[in-house]
Amino acid sequence: MLKAVVTSFVICTMLLMLSPVAKAADVFEVNRKLGRGVNIIGYDPIWRSQDRARFQEKHFRLIKEAGFDSVRINLHAFRHMDANNDYQLSPAWFETLDWAVKNALANKLAVILDLHEFNAMGDDPVGRKPLFLAFWKQVSVHFRNAPDSVVFEILNEPCRGVTAELWDQYYHEALAIIRKDNPTRAVILGPPNWNSVDKLNEFKLPEDDRNIIVTVHYYKPMSFTHQGASWTPTYRKKTGVKWPTSEKDKQAVVAEFKKVHDWAQEQKRPIFLGEFGAYDRADMESRVQYTSFVARTAEKFGFSWAYWQFDSDFIVYDIPNDRWVEPIRDALIPR
Ligand code: BGC
């Protein structure tokens, strides 16, 4: 009798071990793997044609060798959807994305698939909602067998027309779609108002979904980080702003990140600082000071982070001259 019980216990244990129901990766562990990251290819002509790509296969290796752990792929996907065919994403778009994900993973970089259509959604949330949901229907199925180190980010910086109320409704709908095929994948969600740290207290998460990483973006003070930036009318005219101007500037960052950290502790959620940086029009010494102080403070509070961005503007890599912007790289990843 005892022998029969022991035998069936052993068989059951073996069956459980062989069971195809994979154990969910711990979301805090996934967030640790995001570690130090960088935003890539959002504004690269690669999406129009691979022949015109600025970003090349070798850049994944260079990013890894520089010491980064992850890439946040910024996806402006709406223009690649077919309005006459259920908003199907084009095969060419998927081909480019598959190429990027494959190469990132091959270089042991975790990947965030970030739907970066915040402007289109902010302009016309109701009109664009079918595209938003169709995007997640397709991407969720397409990546359902991807490893845990592929993470979905539902929408970058919900803003303007995507009010706090709409955001709550829209993200729940997208999350329900994602959970059909990806029941335990880590999903990144952030507060409204451009993922502002100030909106965390008004941001409600689904209590029963524990596989969520919360994101915030940090560009304060905008007068420094966005000086000379054409897309910010308030800050575009005044350049020459330095950072820090006094110890108070640093203490402001610490105080705000501490608030985020305390909120996260209470909510038992990991934090990902998905964007930060200072536009190229600021002086290099101030950019270095700011970039390294924000990155180190984020790390002190246990946040993973992604620098804005590899190429285009705020750059950490100079593609035309094929070299790192070393002061920024070293500010991010101390040698
Ligand atoms: C936007 C960029 C902008 C950056 C800083 C990003 O989320 O996609 O266009 O340069 O934020 O403002």
Image (cartoon, rainbow, N blue to C red):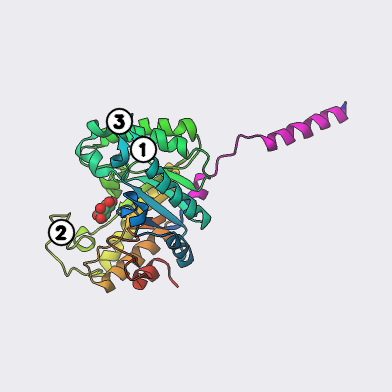
State the separation of the CA atoms marked 3 and 2.
34 Å
Q: Secondary structure at mark 2?
A: loop
Q: Horizontally, is 93 left or right of 209 in the view? A: left
Can residue 146 be seen here? yes
Badge 3 element: helix
Task: Tell me where the magenta segment starts and ends, as one range.
Answer: 2-30
| Nearer to me, 297 or 312 | 312
Q: Nearer the viewer, mark 1 or mark 3?
A: 1
Residue type for callout 2: Tyr
Residue under label 2, please give it: 235
The answer to whether residue 160 is above or below residue 72 is: above
Spatial distance from mark 1 to mark 2, Cα to Cα? 36 Å
Mark 3 lies on residue: 130
* Magenta-drawn stretch, dominant element (helix, strand or loop): helix
User: In the image, 237: left or right of 56?
Assistant: left
Question: Quarter of the image containing the N terminus?
Answer: top right
Q: Regarding mark 1 in the picture, which secondary structure is present there?
A: strand
Q: Quadrant of the C terminus?
A: bottom left
- Residue on which the image places disc 1: 89
Q: Residue 152 got which mark? A: none
12 part of magenta stretch: yes
The mark nearer the N terminus, 1 or 3, is: 1
